[in-house]
């Protein structure tokens, strides 16, 4: 199941194939690069700078062991807390509840044991070999220093807190991900700056971290353009059928392609709705706080598992990210979410001191079962989807790109396409 070859296949022979990729986040950028290096004539389209959206603010985790979907058995019990507790890791403002109900109904249905098992199987297949493939990609595009191989340390205050996540850890074991259980002394041996709240650690030694997700995306796009890929800044409209392929209007100008890949994140559903494509995708609004100059506080990704917070040592400071807020695309960020992250971080890691901080909020595109939609749209030949990766877009970007390229170009080069 797990591909650990660390290869990143080259190709060619498709120089006449015109492909557009809408969305220059990590998924779209790597997809454009992969298609380009296999010989397709690719245009990458985004209204903003590559990597400046959701990819900019993520926690940098390459986490192939994250095979447990967000909707796990018993999630329904947490709904009252989502509505009432402003500090809940999973937050749903009461005013957004009517809009969210259709997605929430599917989310709760996805928490059935059989649905969880199916989602975990599909996620495990998509995650396979992710660390090795990112290492290979980073070397190829000239930024090997961005991938930190020091594992992920998940922390719990006590056995009761750990027991709440037992299902997720069983799924990791089922799919071959090994971890070491640590006591307080073992935690401090790895990360001396962790405060006294945390007494139990689970260490995944084979996981990794990207130390600057924005610079990573920029490096991918730079390598893509060096291979002849085109970058088009502007707002892309809904794809339209034209001459056996597809046309796109970008800021009033028409462009024709044989294939279009939509990797527009949380903005994918409104883009495709006029075509009758109903994608049950919702924005997981995620927040981070970044402390400038505090990155030496920890030396690897540390997960405060009871609070669903990822803490990562970035090139530009310590990043503390987390929370899932279901509140749509238009609502303004809630500064209280960032304030909670900042308070918890300062309470947990003494090394932060008085380091100044900044806040960020972005839209992570999430399917109810946490499984992204990857492939050609049924009944719409030449129209492809790469959307719904939730908080695992970085982890799954390379394997998503390989799946799209294998299927579009009629090749089978990797087990990631299985």
Image (tube, rainbow, N blue to C red):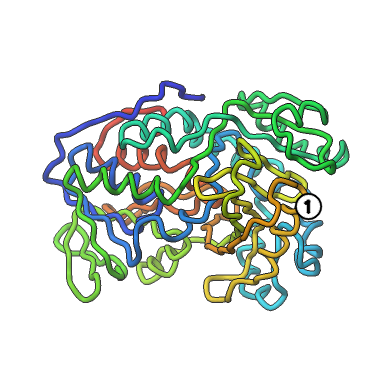
Which is more toward the observer, 199 or 290? 290
* Residue 256 image point, x, y percent: 16, 61
Residue 7 against residue 403 in the figure, above or below: above
Along the horizontal axis of the image, is 230 left or right of 75? left
Farthest residue to the bottom: give it. Answer: 95
Farthest residue to the top: give it. Answer: 5
Residue 157 against residue 190 in the figure, above or below: below
Residue 239 occupies quadrant: bottom left
Q: Residue at x 64, y 46 (%)?
A: 311
Dividing the image into 4 quarters, which one contains the C terminus?
top left
Q: Residue at x 24, y 53 (%)?
A: 259
Which is more toward the observer, 27 or 383? 27
* Residue 274 image point, x, y percent: 37, 71
Q: Residue at x 59, y 45 (%)?
A: 295
* Residue 84 image point, x, y percent: 80, 69
Along the horizontal axis of the image, is 80 left or right of 362? right
Residue 203 occupies quadrant: top right
Which is more toward the observer, 281 or 118? 281
The number of callouts visible is: 1
Along the horizontal axis of the image, is 240 left or right of 209? left
How packed is label 1: few (under 14 Cα within 10 Å), some, or many (20 or more)? some
Disc 1 secondary structure class: helix
* Residue 28 image point, x, y percent: 36, 51
Along the horizontal axis of the image, is 24 left or right of 66? left
Farthest residue to the left: give it. Answer: 16
Q: Which residue is mark 1?
A: 347
Q: Residue at x 66, y 42 (%)?
A: 297
Which is more toward the observer, 229 or 375? 229
């Amino acid at each position: 199941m797990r591909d650990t070859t660390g290869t990143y296949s080259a190709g060619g022979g498709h120089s006449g194939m015109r492909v557009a990729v809408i969305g220059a986040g990590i998924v779209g950028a790597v997809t454009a690069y992969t298609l380009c290096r296999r010989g397709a004539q690719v245009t990458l389209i985004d209204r903003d700078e590559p990597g400046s959206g959701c990819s900019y603010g993520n926690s940098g985790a390459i986490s192939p062991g994250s095979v447990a979907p967000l909707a796990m058995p018993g999630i329904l019990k947490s709904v009252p807390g989502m509505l009432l507790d402003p500090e809940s890791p999973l937050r749903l403002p009461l005013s957004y509840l009517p809009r969210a109900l259709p997605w929430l109904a599917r989310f709760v249905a996805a928490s059935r044991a059989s649905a969880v098992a199916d989602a975990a199987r599909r996620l495990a297949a998509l995650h396979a070999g992710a660390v090795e493939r990112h290492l290979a990609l980073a070397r190829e595009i000239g930024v090997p220093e961005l991938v930190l191989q020091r594992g992920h340390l998940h922390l719990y205050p006590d056995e009761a807190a750990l027991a709440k996540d037992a299902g997720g850890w069983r799924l990791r074991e089922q799919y071959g991900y090994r971890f070491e259980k640590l006591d307080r002394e073992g935690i401090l041996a790895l990360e001396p700056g962790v405060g006294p709240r945390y007494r139990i650690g689970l260490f995944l030694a084979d996981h990794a971290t990207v130390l600057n997700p924005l610079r990573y995306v920029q490096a991918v796009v730079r390598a893509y353009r060096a291979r002849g890929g085109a970058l088009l800044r502007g707002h892309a409209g809904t794809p339209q059928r034209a001459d056996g392929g597809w046309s796109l209007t970008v800021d009033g100008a028409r462009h024709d392609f044989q294939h279009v890949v939509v990797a527009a994140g949380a903005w994918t559903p409104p883009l495709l709705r006029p075509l009758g494509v109903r994608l049950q995708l919702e924005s997981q609004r995620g927040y981070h706080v970044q402390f400038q100059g505090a990155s030496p506080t920890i030396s690897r990704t540390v997960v405060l598992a009871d609070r669903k917070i990822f803490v990562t040592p970035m090139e530009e400071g310590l990043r503390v990210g987390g929370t899932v807020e279901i509140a749509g695309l238009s609502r303004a960020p809630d500064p209280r979410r960032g304030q909670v992250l900042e308070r918890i971080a300062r309470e947990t890691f003494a090394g932060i001191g008085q380091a100044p901080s900044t806040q960020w909020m972005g839209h992570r595109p999430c399917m109810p079962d946490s499984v992204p939609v990857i492939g050609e749209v049924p009944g719409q030949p030449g129209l492809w989807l790469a959307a719904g990766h939730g908080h695992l877009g970085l982890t799954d970007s390379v394997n998503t790109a390989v799946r799209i390229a294998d299927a579009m170009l009629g090749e089978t080069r990797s087990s990631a396409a299985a």
